[in-house]
Structures are given as C-alpha cells and as structure tokens.
Image: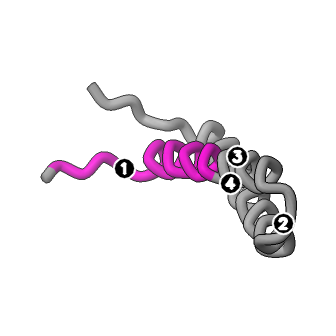
Amino acid sequence: MTSEVTRPEQVALRAKLAELIQEHRDLDAAIEAMGPTHDIMQLTRLKKKKLQLKDQITKIENQLLPDIIA
C-alpha cells in the first residue's frame, strides 16, 4: 500500500527537512569545536542527538522520494 504525499505535505516536509539538516550541521560544528578535552558526557549527548536527527532526516527523505519498484 502506497500513500502519496500531497503537495502541502511535501512543502511542510521539505521545510522540516531543512530545519533538521541545519540543526544537524550546528551540532556537528559544536562537537568539532568541543574537541577531545571537554566534558565526555556532554559530547556523548550531542553525538546521540546528532544520530537522532540523522534518523529523522532519513525518514523524511524516504517520505519525499517516490516508491521505486525494484
């Protein structure tokens, strides 16, 4: 069963996708700026959040891509 994404839903998903991508980049920069000498717990939390964002990004990208029959 395929569920088509309507045009308004696509617009909303693309806006959310852009927001998540920016947040992911911001976290990446924050992690890079921390370096290895900072709080390991904070670094771990940031990396976990970054992975969660990546999962959300992938989910939205999959919703926006048309189904491909292999």
Q: Which residue bears the numbered disc 3? A: 49
User: Distance of mark 2 from mark 4, alpha carbons?
Assistant: 10 Å
* Mark 3 neighbour density, 10 Å: few (under 14) some (14–19) many (20 or more): some
Q: Which residue bears the numbered disc 1? A: 66
> What type is the residue that disc 4 sits on?
Lys
> What type is the residue that disc 2 sits on?
Ala
- Tell me the residue at 54%/36% (across/down): 6
Q: Which residue bears the numbered disc 4? A: 47
Asked if residue 66 lies left or right of residue 57, the reply is left
User: Distance of mark 1 from mark 3, alpha carbons?
Assistant: 28 Å
> What type is the residue that disc 3 sits on?
Lys
SS category of the residue bearing label 3 = helix
Asked if residue 13 lies left or right of residue 65, the reply is right
* Marks 4,3: beta carbons within 8 A: yes
* Marks 2,4: beta carbons within 8 A: no
Q: Which of label 1 and label 3 is nearer to you?
A: 3
- Tell me the residue at 50%/43% (across/down): 59
